[in-house]
Image (tube, rainbow, N blue to C red):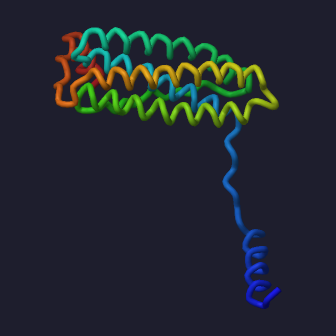
Amino acid sequence: MSIPHMMLNGWRRFLTKFAVSPPRPTLLEDVGDTYRAELVLAARCTEHAQRMYYPQLRTDLLRIAAEVRAHLPWLQEQILGLGGHLPSSSPTLILGGNNWECLRRDVEEARQGGIRVLDSIHRAERDHPRIAAGLQRIRKDKLRHREEFRRMMMKSDPSAIPAPRPRHAEEMQEKHA
């Protein structure tokens, strides 16, 4: 072995002694993150449905929101079962300028959510197979929702303006302000 090669290996060993790896998220943190993401998705789909120009797509968005809300009680049960506390923060919504942009964001969020849930499934498989099975069901729904968002996006016009908001929604926002 050459001297430069030995020196390089020595430096590598020296530096790895001081390297700090970031802590891996726990299953409780993963389930809590999934819970928060599902809350945001349900709220976003509901808000987006109110702004949707096309009535048939509005119905689809409300159905997806209901399916996502159906995951919440199970996630709450898992969080409490793992010794955690339910997140108390309300979701902050970021919507696009028009329906197409909202759907594009929904597709991307569903893609990222599927990846996050898959990581959680891998973490849970060995020690908590029941939680892993539940997360697998959520991931399956996320993949299906992603395809539905993509289908809706294809039917939507990128230059369409958002539908006027219902009068009661505007009044509710004024009360919250």
- Tell how many labels: 0
Residue found 17% across the figure and 17% down from its top:
164
Instruction: Give coordinates of residue 31: x percent, y percent.
Output: 64, 29
The structure residue drawn at horizontal position 65% and vertical position 23%, both measured from the top left corner, is 136
Does 162 sit left or right of 47 as displayed? left
Residue 109 is drawn in which quadrant? top left
In this view, 9 is above or below 83: below
Horizontally, residue 42 falls left or right of residue 167, namely right
Residue 160 at x, y percent in the picture: 17, 25
Q: Position of residue 151 (x, y in %)?
A: 36, 21
Residue 44 appears in the rendering: no
Which residue is outermost to the bottom? Answer: 3
Q: Quadrant of the N terminus?
A: bottom right
Nearer to us in this view, 106 or 83? 106
Depth check: 20 or 58 in front? 58
If the image is split into quadrants, where does the C terminus sit?
top left
Seen in the picture, residue 130 relative to 7 is either above or below; the reply is above
Whether residue 51 is visible? yes
User: Residue 104, position in %: x, y?
Assistant: 34, 32
- Return the residue nearer the eye: 33 or 152: 152
What's the residue at 20%, 23% (across, down)? 162
Residue drawn at point x = 74 percent, y = 31 percent: 124
